[in-house]
């Protein structure tokens, strides 16, 4: 076996991976939209399509970390709703933004901490815990505000929900995501914390025996998820100029779909944030294009669902093909 | 280098200028495309309304497109508002999931030169020019009482099976019915024995309807002012063999209870849903051409439906609803 053929499988895995496939697909869809879909290329349209994913983009960041660590948070939509209600009530009571924003973030962190405690101290599965708190947090939001909505916010806050950055098409509501995404990407892919998260998801027992403080890491991830949901709750309140208990119903499924489409393994331990960012862009573009082609909401949901299933099938099939290519022609790992 | 920069700036400048020109509030001279944005994509109510809009489009030109979210939320509707603006429709006709939450997006649409009307379910007044409302609240209550009177010969015990104790619409109707009965001799012999609640659930409505019939052996009828309750109660009474002995009326899509209406044991207050879409399309085109702005007292023509006058707060009433009886049930396609 010569050196050349040992490099080849590296080449295959480096370039024929899921991230690059998604990137190519996304670029192809965007290119098609630019050339073939009337009105896609307008400044207004692009900025609105980007603004439309502001909250999902935020929430998917901690969700990816949780799924990689073999956990999940189904209560994100409810935390978003609850924190938006808390924020709305604070503003209604005359609290200045500089007070209301940190208090809301802390409230989100506490919700996440509650999830984290149940998961780490009581050893309950996060799927069950957050299924419960999904109803619980929204229930509290209903207790606080009933079915009313709060619509009176300071102008500076509402401007944030509507304006773009300077004269560019970049909506301001995407800024929190643009600030947080690099932080999450570096933490996950370049720092010891990230390696610990992958280790936990890859094999929790092995991680525990190798000295990783598993409970503390998982707890921290849930708190982060809660706080980011609170940020998303405020972005949502700014963008829709309302705070109410039924905000963002069903958003958790969208977020999980994007994470899985982005190549995060449901079984934990695998996947990268870059793939998720492509998935985010892909889903936003497809929804926007389908809308411009006058296709209704239900059909859009169908297309996104199909895309997820086809992509899962394709990634499985591709892996099998690559694996068989590797073993048949290169026999790298089998040795001589 | 510098000339290149200047050229780029010039191009950018002219682009911005052309966008600004397109944004100015212009009055359309030709019929425009009207983007209908109902609460929910697959709701048959809005599909029937859409056939009316298409009929109107055939008569006066332009186009009626319909696009709606798969979830009945304001958030989902905002994406569709923006999308319709991107498609450069002339007018957006919206039935709002949340009157206030969609208002900023609609005002942004207006800044892009898109006019806005609401139908079926209003948005905040500042965010649209006219609201095409199907029927005035009091008239619906009056007709339900009248319909019950017709069926029981204005004599005997009846009950009301409402939706929830907190439902604003229903409570206002019930108060109006009580007041009317106290003041009008025509209803002097009718007696309201109980107001029960079906909680917007088919099952609870069925149980409550049967419970009312058992609790009051002389009960002659039930008024059910909630769309989901009337068909459910009718089925339950039918299965229990009580239909006909206890007459039912209320609000519900006529097609859902057509067979009970045909045999005379049920009546219903309803409007022609198709006409609502038809009227909305005519109003939208009038708004696009600046012939209609929403000021009280303005009038406009709506094809076969005739002339309409704008009421207070830019509201236009489709007209009185109808009592659906065996004689006219075929006219109601929804």
Image: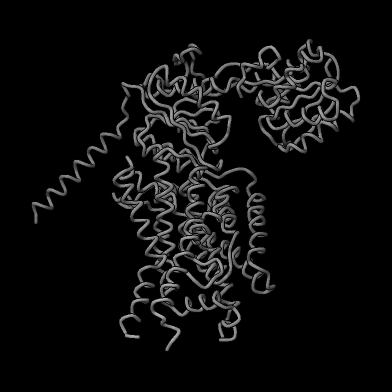
- The quadrant of the picture occupied by the N terminus of chain A is bottom left
Placement of B95 over or under A48, stated as above or below: above
Locate residue B201, reporting x and y percent.
Answer: 73, 38
Q: Position of residue B113 (x, y in %)?
A: 34, 33
Q: Is residue B56 visible?
A: yes
Position of B168 relative to A279 (above/below) = above
Q: Which colour style is shown?
A: one colour
Q: Position of residue A53 (x, y in %)?
A: 44, 52
> Does residue A160 show up?
no
The residue lying toward the viewer, choosing from A41 and B21, is: A41
Q: Residue at x 52, y 27 (%)?
A: B119
Among all residues in the image, which is located at the extreme bottom?
A336
Q: Residue at x 56, y 56 (%)?
A: A252
- Nearest the camera: A220 or A39? A39
Coordinates of residue A306 in the picture (x, y in percent): 50, 51
Please tell me which residue lies in front, A111 or B95.
B95
Q: How many marks?
A: 0
Q: Is residue B257 left or right of residue A190?
A: right
Residue lying farthest right? B217
Q: Residue at x 47, y 23 (%)?
A: B53
Q: Residue at x 33, y 47 (%)?
A: A33
Q: Is residue A195 above or below residue B196?
A: below
For the C terminus of chain A, the image quarter is: bottom left
């Amino acid at each position: 076996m010569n050196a050349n053929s040992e490099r080849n499988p590296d080449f295959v895995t480096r370039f024929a991976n899921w991230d690059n496939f998604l990137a190519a697909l996304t670029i192809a869809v965007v290119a098609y939209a630019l050339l073939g879909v009337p009105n896609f290329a307008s400044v207004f349209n692009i900025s609105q399509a980007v603004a439309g994913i502001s909250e999902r983009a935020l929430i998917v960041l901690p969700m990816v970390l949780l799924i990689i660590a073999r956990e999940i948070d189904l209560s994100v939509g409810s935390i978003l709703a609850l924190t938006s209600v808390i924020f709305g009530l604070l503003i209604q009571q005359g609290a200045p933004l500089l007070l209301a924003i940190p208090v809301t973030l802390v409230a989100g962190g506490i919700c996440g901490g509650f999830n984290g405690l149940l998961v780490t101290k009581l050893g309950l599965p996060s799927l069950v815990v957050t299924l419960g708190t999904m109803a619980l947090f929204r229930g509290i939001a209903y207790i606080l505000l009933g079915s009313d909505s709060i619509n009176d916010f300071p102008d500076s806050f509402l401007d944030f929900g509507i304006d773009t950055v300077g004269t560019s098409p970049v909506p301001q509501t995407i800024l929190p995501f643009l600030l947080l995404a690099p932080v999450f990407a570096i933490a996950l892919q370049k720092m010891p914390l990230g390696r610990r998260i992958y280790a936990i998801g890859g094999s929790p027992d092995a991680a525990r025996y190798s000295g990783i403080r598993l409970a503390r890491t998982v707890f921290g991830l849930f708190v982060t998820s809660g706080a980011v949901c609170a940020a998303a709750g405020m972005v949502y309140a700014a963008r829709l100029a309302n705070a109410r208990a039924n905000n963002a119903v069903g958003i958790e499924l969208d977020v999980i779909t994007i994470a899985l489409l982005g190549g995060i393994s449901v079984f934990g331990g695998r996947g990268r944030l870059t793939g998720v960012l492509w998935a985010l862009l892909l889903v936003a573009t497809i929804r926007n294009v389908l809308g411009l082609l006058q296709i209704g909401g239900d059909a859009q949901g169908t297309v996104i669902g199909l895309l997820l299933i086809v992509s899962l099938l394709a990634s499985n099939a591709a892996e099998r093909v690559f694996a068989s290519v590797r073993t048949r022609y290169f026999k790298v790992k089998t040795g001589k | 280098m510098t000339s290149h920069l200047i050229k780029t700036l010039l191009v950018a400048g002219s682009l911005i200028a052309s966008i600004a020109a397109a944004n100015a509030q212009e009055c359309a001279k030709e019929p425009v495309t009207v983007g209908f944005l109902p609460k929910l994509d697959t709701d048959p109510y809005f599909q029937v309304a859409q056939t009316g809009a298409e009929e109107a489009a055939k008569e006066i030109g332009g186009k009626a497109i319909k696009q709606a979210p798969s979830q009945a939320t304001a958030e989902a509707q905002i994406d569709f508002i923006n999308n319709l603006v991107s498609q450069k429709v002339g007018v957006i006709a919206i039935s709002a999931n949340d009157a206030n939450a969609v208002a900023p997006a609609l005002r942004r649409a207006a800044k892009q030169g898109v006019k806005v009307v609401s139908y079926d379910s209003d948005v905040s007044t500042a965010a649209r020019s006219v609201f095409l409302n199907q029927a005035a609240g009091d008239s619906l209550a009056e007709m339900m009482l009248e319909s019950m009177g017709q069926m029981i010969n204005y004599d005997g015990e009846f009950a009301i099976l409402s939706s929830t104790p907190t439902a604003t619409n229903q409570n206002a109707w019930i108060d109006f019915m009580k007041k009317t009965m106290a003041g009008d001799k025509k209803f002097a012999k009718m007696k309201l024995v109980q107001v029960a609640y079906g909680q917007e659930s088919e099952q609870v409505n069925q149980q409550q309807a049967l419970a009312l019939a058992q609790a009051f052996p002389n009960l002659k009828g039930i008024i059910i002012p909630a769309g989901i309750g009337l068909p459910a109660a009718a089925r339950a009474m039918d299965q229990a063999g009580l239909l006909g002995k206890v007459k039912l009326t209320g609000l519900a899509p006529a097609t859902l209870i057509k067979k009970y209406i045909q045999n005379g044991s049920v009546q219903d207050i309803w409007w022609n849903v198709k006409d609502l879409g038809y009227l909305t399309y005519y109003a939208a085109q009038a708004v696009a051409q600046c012939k209609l702005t929403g000021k009280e007292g303005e009038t406009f023509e709506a094809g076969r439906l005739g002339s309409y006058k704008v009421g207070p707060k830019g509201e236009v009433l489709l007209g009185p609803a109808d009592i659906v009886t065996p004689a006219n049930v075929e006219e109601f396609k929804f």
